[in-house]
Amino acid sequence: MKRAELVMAGVLALLSIYLMWKSTELNVGYIEGEGPGGGAWPFWLAGIMLICTIVIFVNALKGKTVPSRSEEPMLDGYGKKMLLQVGGGILGFIALIDIVSMYGAMFFFLLYYLGFLGRHTKLLTITTAVITPIVFFFFFEGLMRITMPKGLPFLEPLFNVLFDIIY
Amino acid sequence: MIEILGQLGDGILMSLQPVNLMLIVIGVSLGLFIGAMPGLGSVNGVAILLPVTFLVPPASAIIFLAAIYYGAMYGGAISSITLGIPGASTAVATTFDGRPLALKGRARLALVTAAIASFIGGTVANVLFTGFAPLLASVALSFGPPEIFALMLLAFATFVGLGGDDIAKTIFSICVGLVLASVGFDQISGEPRLIFGGISGFLHGINFLVLAIGVYGIGEMLWTIDSTRGKITTTETEMTVKGTVDDAKEGVRRGWKGTAIGSFLGFFVGILPAAGATPGSLMAYGVAKMVSKTPEEFGKGHPGGVAAPEAANNSASTGSMLPMLTLGIPGSPTTAILLGGMVIWGLTPGPRLFVEQPEFVWGLIGSFYISNVFALIVNLAAIPIFIWMLRMPFTLLASMIFVLSVVGGYAATRDMHDVWLMLGFGFAAFALRKLDYPLAPAVLAIVLGPIAEPTLRQSLLLSSGDPMIFFNRPIAGPITVVALVLILLPLFKMISQRRKAST
C-alpha cells in the first residue's frame, strides 16, 4: 500500500497547488480598510494542505505510517470487484435519474442490488423494488412537498395518476 | 425565583392541556421521523408544518413547532447510529462513534445512550433557560467575531491535539473541509470563488450534508463492505428489558462526562447568533474527546462520543430559542422560521415579550419540559423497531442506505450536481479511508467553515490586520491560548518521546 500512499500524497499535493492557483483569482493579501481579500482564506489553507501532503509523502517514504508498512495492495481482487459492482451500481442509479426519474432509478437499482448482488428471492426483490419508490413518492411529493426529478416526459402520465391521489 | 417557578408551573399546566398535549405527542413523533430521514432536519419539518399552526392559538402553535424541533433532535441520532448516515446536520458527530458501536453489535447501547443524553441535555438547557434567560442573552451578545473565531479554533484544535490519527492527515482533512466550505461566493465581497471553470452548481456552495452523506453513506459503506469482505453482522443485540437497563447504566457510566459537556457547551453555543445545534454538537464531541482519559477510543465506538453530541444538540436547540425570544435574534435556521411564525401570529419577539405575553413565553418554556419527557418515551419505545431494522439481511440494509443517501443528497439542495458531487466525495472518501486519512475533521470543518472565515476576516478588519486581537481580549484570549496549546500538543509529545528514547 506504500505506493498507493505516495501516489495519493502526490495527487493531493497537485490538488493543493491547483486550489492555491484558483484562489489567486481573488485578492489573497490584506486590503487596507477591507481586511483580508476574498482569496486569502482558501489560498493559505491550500498552502497548509500542500505542506501536509509533503509531510505525508516523506513519512510514507520513510515507512512511518501504517499503510506504508502494509504489504497488502490497496485494492485486491475482491475490492476491485466490489467497487465495480457496488460503486458501479450507485453510479448507474444516479445516471438513470434524469432518464427514468428518481423513483424509476430507485426501482432499477433495488432490482439490481437485491436480485443480482444480494441474491434475494424474486418475491422479496420485486416487492421491495416496487413498494420503496411508492412510499418515497408519497412521503416526499405529498407530505414534505419536495419535488424529486421526474425524468423524461414519457413518464408524465404515470406521475399524473400518482399526483391525482395526492391532490 | 418563586415568581419564576410559579410562572413555569402555569406554563407546564398549560402544556398539559389536552389539545397542547396532543400537539406535543404528534409533534415529537413527526419530528423523530423527519429527523431520522437523511437530508431532512428540524428546519424542513418546522417550515413545512408552519402553515398548519394557523389553525390553533399562537401558544399551541409554537408548542407544536417546538415539539417537532425537539423530536428532530432525538431523531437525527437514529439513522446516524443504525444506518451510518447523519439523519440531520445536528447528528453528524453522532455518526463518529454511534456507527462503530452499531457495527460492533452495540446499537442498543448507542441508541439508549443517545436517548438519555438527549434527555439530560434538554433538561439542563431547560433549567438554564428558565433561570438565566435574560442574563445569558446579554453574555452571548458580548461574543464578537474574535470570540467566535477563537471558539472555532478550539473546535479544530481538539481534533488536532488529541486525535490518535496521523497529525498531518488530520490537519489536511480539516483544511480540505474549510476550503470546500469556501466554494461559492465570497461572503464579504460577493464575488464568485473556486467555482472551477464556472460550473453553476458550485455557485450555491457545497452543502455540508452532501459531503457528510458522501463520506458516511457511500464512502464508509464501500469501505465496510471491502474490509469485511461483505460478511457484515451489524448487530446481534436482543431486545430485553434487562439488556436495555444494563445498556442504560453503561451509557450513563461511560457517557456522563460527555453528557455534562454537551449539555452546558451545547446550550452556550446554541445561544450564539449564527451558531446553533450543529456546531454545538461537533464542538461538544471535540471537547469530550479532549477531556476523556481514553481519547484514542473516540471514533471507534465510545459511548461518550454519542452522549456529547446528542446532549449538545438538544441543549443547543433550547439555547437557540433564547436569543430568539429575548432579543429577536434567531440562533439557527429553525429558530429563524419560528421567529417568522411569531411575527405572523402577531407577536413581537424581544425583551418586552416576557412582560407583554407571559402566558405565551411560559407556555412555550413549559412545553420544552413536557416535550423532552415525551421525546424520551417515544424514542425509547421505538428502539426495538430500530434494532429490528438492523437485523435485516445486510444487502437489504445496504441498498436502503444507498437509496437514502442519493435521495438525501438531492433533498438537501434539490440539485443533481450535488448528487454527482456526493458520489465523487463517496469514492474519494473510500480511497482516503483505505489510506488512514481521518474524515470526521473534514466534516467538522465544512460545518464550521462558514462561521470561521467571516469571523476571522471581521476580526482582522476590526484590528487593522493585527492578529493580537485574538489574544488581548478577555474572553477570546484564554480560548485562543488553549486552542494553540492543543494544536502544539503533538509537537510537545514528539519532543518528550524523543528525549525519553535518547535517555
Image (spheres, rainbow, N blue to C red):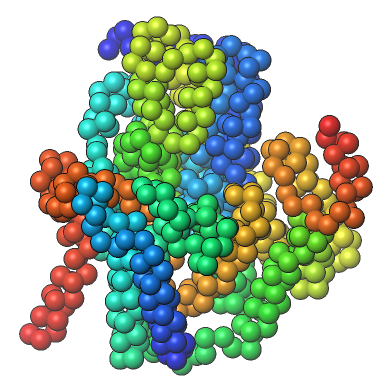
Relative placement, left or right, of B377 versus A27 is: right
In the image, residue B251 lies at what x, y percent? 43, 48
On screen, residue B205 above or below B274: below
Residue toward you, B124 or B485: B485
Q: What residue is rendered at 27% in x and 59% in y?
A: B157
Camera sees residue B192: yes
Residue toward you, B73 or B467: B467
Relative placement, left or right, of B121 versus A52 is: right
In the image, residue B397 lies at what x, y percent? 69, 60
Q: How many dots with numbers? A: 0
- Kindly indicate the quadrant of the structure image that contains residue B467: bottom left
Q: What residue is rendered at 30% in x and 56% in y?
A: A37
Q: What residue is rendered at 59% in x and 32% in y?
A: B47
The quarter of the rendered structure image containing the C terminus of chain B is: bottom left
On screen, residue B356 above or below B409: above
Camera sees residue B386: no
On screen, residue A77 above or below A94: below
The quarter of the rendered structure image containing the N terminus of chain B is: top left
On screen, residue A45 above or below B228: above
- Kindly indicate the quadrant of the structure image that contains residue A69: bottom left
In the image, residue B315 lies at what x, y percent? 40, 35
Residue at the far left in the pictured view: B503
Residue toward you, A81 or B259: A81
- Kindly indicate the quadrant of the structure image that contains residue B331: top left
Q: What residue is rendered at 18% in x and 59% in y?
A: B484
Relative placement, left or right, of A9 versus B196 is: left
In the image, residue B276 lies at what x, y percent? 40, 39
Relative placement, left or right, of B497 versus B114 is: left
